[in-house]
Amino acid sequence: MSQPSAPLPAKFYARPVLEVAPELIGCTVHHDGVAGVIVETEAYHESEPACHAFVGLTARTTTLFGPPGRAYVYRSYGVHALLNAVCEPEGVGAAVLIRALMPIAGIQQMRARRGLAEAREEQLCSGPGKLTQALGISLDENGVCLASGPIRIGARNGEWTAPAVVAGARVGINRAVELRWRF
């Protein structure tokens, strides 16, 4: 298991989501004995219609409007749990979707969780539903603190201290597709 880097404090997330999303590239997600470096994110903000918070405060979106630095875990299309990091000050609905990871620890466990004994490492966490399955993240972890766990996001370290980050269009949505909020 890789050594977890220092967890990102709540103040890291208490900024505009469009600042946080690219700065999460190169950070590490740790959960239940496995870990991966974040290599793809997408930003979502209550001001645009692709964000769940666009409809306002509901039972589903409560976590999005809560304190920054929490996990917003929701079910997508009734199939996959997706991991997001809540951003901006409390009361603003915004989060960063963690879209892909580069596995760095617990790879055999990831393969077992995905049911892919022979899968190439780069395929284990190459999408938001794949990575939550590989990391063993469930809906029960909605609202947990990303600094104290059980899901922890650690600061960039090692070769990931200054990754090259590019922006592009978000994928898998049909609203606000023109926004280049994928990193």
Image: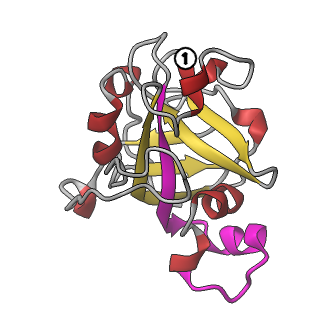
Where residue 159 sits, quadrant-wise, is: bottom left
Is residue 126 in view?
yes
Q: Is residue 155 above or below residue 120?
A: above
Could you tell me residue 31's position as x and y percent?
61, 48
Residue that numbered label 1 is attached to: 65
Horizontally, residue 72 falls left or right of residue 29, namely right
At 47% across and 25% down in the image, what residue appears? 46
Horizontally, residue 20 falls left or right of residue 140, namely left
User: In the displayed image of the protein, which residue is found farthest to the top?
Assistant: 91
Could you tell me residue 180's position as x and y percent?
31, 51
The color scheme shown is secondary structure
Figure quadrant of the C terminus: bottom left
Is residue 149 in view?
no
Could you tell me residue 127's position as x and y percent?
57, 64
Asked whether residue 98 is drawn in magenta, I would say yes
At 59% across and 44% down in the image, what residue appears? 83
Where residue 40 sits, quadrant-wise, is: bottom left
At 65% across and 18% down in the image, what residue appears? 62
Horizontally, residue 144 falls left or right of residue 9, namely right
Q: Please provide the residue range marked out in magenta.
A: 94-121
Element class at badge 1:
helix
Q: Is residue 72 above or below residue 167?
A: above
At 21% across and 53% down in the image, what residue appears? 161
Kindly identify the amino acid type of the residue bearing the numbered disc 1.
Phe
User: In the displayed image of the protein, which residue is found farthest to the bottom?
Assistant: 118
Could you tell me residue 23's position as x and y percent?
28, 44
Figure quadrant of the N terminus: bottom right
How packed is label 1: few (under 14 Cα within 10 Å), some, or many (20 or more)? Answer: many
Q: How many marks?
A: 1
Asked whether residue 141 is drawn in magenta, I would say no
